[in-house]
């Protein structure tokens, strides 16, 4: 109690005590024990061959394969974004032919497994030995669809179908009123899209798009089936000769973890940029 000058009394608010979360403490302790057991097992098991892991971690051939992986992912994702934007706008078009064509493209390349698509492209010469444009130009298919070409085309066709749906969902997330307001101001369609719709749609587009980029980086490992010298294939070449399979696969995993961590940091920065008005940043 606290007495006031006029004889009145007031009560101080009671201190609120939080509930003791015993379940959270127990779950945390169990998780810590499991992590400790896994780490202990990994570092005490000689079959992991950690000295070999350290030896190959900065191997020139693996670093070259890592560079090819990053290059392949960046080129494929850039092309997929461009094609995905075009497909998303076609899906939003009032022209039924464009809408149907874009919908069929998305359906086909989302339904076709990437591995099958890569093998089809790699063996395209069996279907079309020559690629020709009427009677003007005719070239051998194998000179055009090289290993790198098949990898880039396959990844682009596959990922652009997903990018198209990401961009379409972002465009749909912007209310119709925003477009109507732009029309009322006399903005042409493309200007309204660039200045009004896309900046708002990016809040919904960026998270799944960056996640798709992470997925593309990991998916590049599939192109090893057509002998593309990316990270995994470079490791396979080495352990086919030395039989040090486990340490080399651990090296590959390590570099994928590094790339994913860097992309995660970039994703958070980009999201913070597009959410700065809403988040007060």
Image (spheres, grey):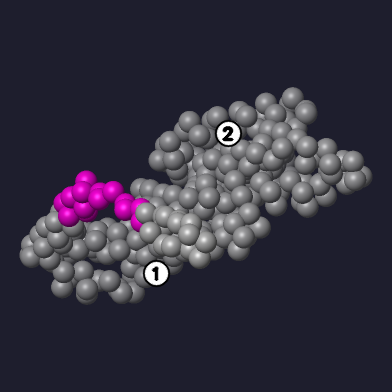
Left or right: residue 205 versus residue 18 is right
The relative height of residue 270 versus residue 86 in the rendered view (above or below) is below
- What residue lies at 84% left-to-right and 44% top-to-bottom? 182
Pinpoint residue 191: horizontal percent, then vertical percent: 83, 49
Residue placed furthest toward the front? 7
Secondary-structure class at tag 1: helix
Left or right: residue 213 versus residue 238 is right
On residue 64, which mark appears? 1
Q: Nearer the viewer, residue 122 or 280?
A: 280
Pinpoint residue 201: horizontal percent, then vertical percent: 66, 46
Pinpoint residue 60: horizontal percent, then vertical percent: 34, 74
Q: Nearer the viewer, residue 23 or 38?
A: 23
Secondary-structure class at tag 2: helix
- What residue lies at 22% left-to-right and 46% top-to-bottom? 23
In the rendered view of the protein, which quadrant contains the C terminus? bottom right
Magenta span: 15-31
Work out whether residue 81 can be spotted.
no
- What residue lies at 65% left-to-right and 39% top-to-bottom? 173
Q: Decide which of tag 1 and tag 2 comes sooner along the chain.
A: 1
Q: Is residue 198 magenta?
A: no
Work out whether residue 184 can be spotted.
yes
Left or right: residue 55 versus residue 226 is left
Residue matched to label 2: 106
On residue 255, which mark appears? none
Q: Determine the CA span between mark 1 and mark 2.
A: 33 Å
Left or right: residue 88 versus residue 22 is right
**Mark 2 neighbour class, 10 Å CA radius: few under 14, some 14 to 19, many 20 or more:** many
Pinpoint residue 153: horizontal percent, then vertical percent: 54, 47
**Mark 1 neighbour class, 10 Å CA radius: few under 14, some 14 to 19, many 20 or more:** some
């Amino acid at each position: 109690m606290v007495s006031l000058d006029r004889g009145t009394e007031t009560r101080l608010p009671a201190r609120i005590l939080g509930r003791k979360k015993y379940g959270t403490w127990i779950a945390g302790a169990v998780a810590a024990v499991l992590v400790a057991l896994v780490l202990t097992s990994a570092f005490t098991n000689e079959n992991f061959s950690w000295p070999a892991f350290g030896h190959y971690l900065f191997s020139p051939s693996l670093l070259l394969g890592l560079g090819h992986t990053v290059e392949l992912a960046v080129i494929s994702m850039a092309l997929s974004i461009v094609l995905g934007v075009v497909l998303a706008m076609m899906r939003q078009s009032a022209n039924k032919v464009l809408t149907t064509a874009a919908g069929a493209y998305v359906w086909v390349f989302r339904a076709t497994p990437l591995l099958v698509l890569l093998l089809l492209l790699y063996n395209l010469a069996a279907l079309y030995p020559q690629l020709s444009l009427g009677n003007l130009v005719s070239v051998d298919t194998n000179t055009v669809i090289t290993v790198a070409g098949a990898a880039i085309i396959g990844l682009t066709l596959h990922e652009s179908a997903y990018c198209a749906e990401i961009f379409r969902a972002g465009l749909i997330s912007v209310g119709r009123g925003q477009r109507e307001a732009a029309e009322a101001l006399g903005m042409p369609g493309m200007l309204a899209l660039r200045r009004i719709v896309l900046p708002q749609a990016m809040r919904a587009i960026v998270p799944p798009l960056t996640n798709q980029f992470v997925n593309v980086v990991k998916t590049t490992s599939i192109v090893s089936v057509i002998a593309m010298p990316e990270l995994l294939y470079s490791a396979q070449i080495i352990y086919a000769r030395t039989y040090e399979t486990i340490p080399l696969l651990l090296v590959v995993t390590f570099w994928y973890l590094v790339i994913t961590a860097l992309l995660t940091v970039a994703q958070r920065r980009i999201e913070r940029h597009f959410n700065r008005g809403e988040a007060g940043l």
